Image (cartoon, helix red, strand yellow):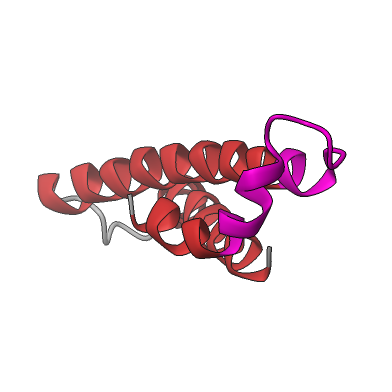
């Protein structure tokens, strides 16, 4: 779960910084983001990090459901494999 939470923290920090950076710079009167590349890049980072954040929340929910479910459940065999499947799921 620690790896999933760390990934979620990084994604949320990127969402906050990429979304608020342009507005903060404009409020202070700094025009460092006048080029099209920096504006589009910050929008791209914001969109990707928001998608990663949503995907990580879903992954965390599934992982917790597998871990919490009772032994008689059909997911019982996945409890053993759950720790091995976390890293490939995050990479995917």
Q: From the viewer's perspective, is 18 left or right of 43?
A: right
- Give x and y (percent) for residue 40: 20, 42
Q: From the viewer's perspective, is 85 left or right of 83?
A: left
Q: Is 41 situated above or below 84?
A: above
- Give x and y (percent) for residue 86: 51, 58
Q: Which residue is found at the position 84% from the left and 45% from the top?
A: 68
Q: Is residue 29 at least partly visible in the picture?
A: no
Q: Is residue 83 at least partly visible in the picture?
A: yes
**Number of callouts in the render?**
0
> Overall secondary structure of the magenta stretch?
helix
Q: From the viewer's perspective, is 50 left or right of 4?
A: left
Q: Which residue is found at the position 64% from the left and 58% from the top?
A: 80
- Residue found at the very far top of the displayed protein: 74
Front position in the image: 83 or 22? 83
- Give x and y (percent) for residue 11: 50, 55
The verdict on residue 67 being magenta is yes
The verdict on residue 92 being magenta is no
Q: Quadrant of residue 66?
A: top right
* Magenta-colored span: 64-83
């Amino acid at each position: 779960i620690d790896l999933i939470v760390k990934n979620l923290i990084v994604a949320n920090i990127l969402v906050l910084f990429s979304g608020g950076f342009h507005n903060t710079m404009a409020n202070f009167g700094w025009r460092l983001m006048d080029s099209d590349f920096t504006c589009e890049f910050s929008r791209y980072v914001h969109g990707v990090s928001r998608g990663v954040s949503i995907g990580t929340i879903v992954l965390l929910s599934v992982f917790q459901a597998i871990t919490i479910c009772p032994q008689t459940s059909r997911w019982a065999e996945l409890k053993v494999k759950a720790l091995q499947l976390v890293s490939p799921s995050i990479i995917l």
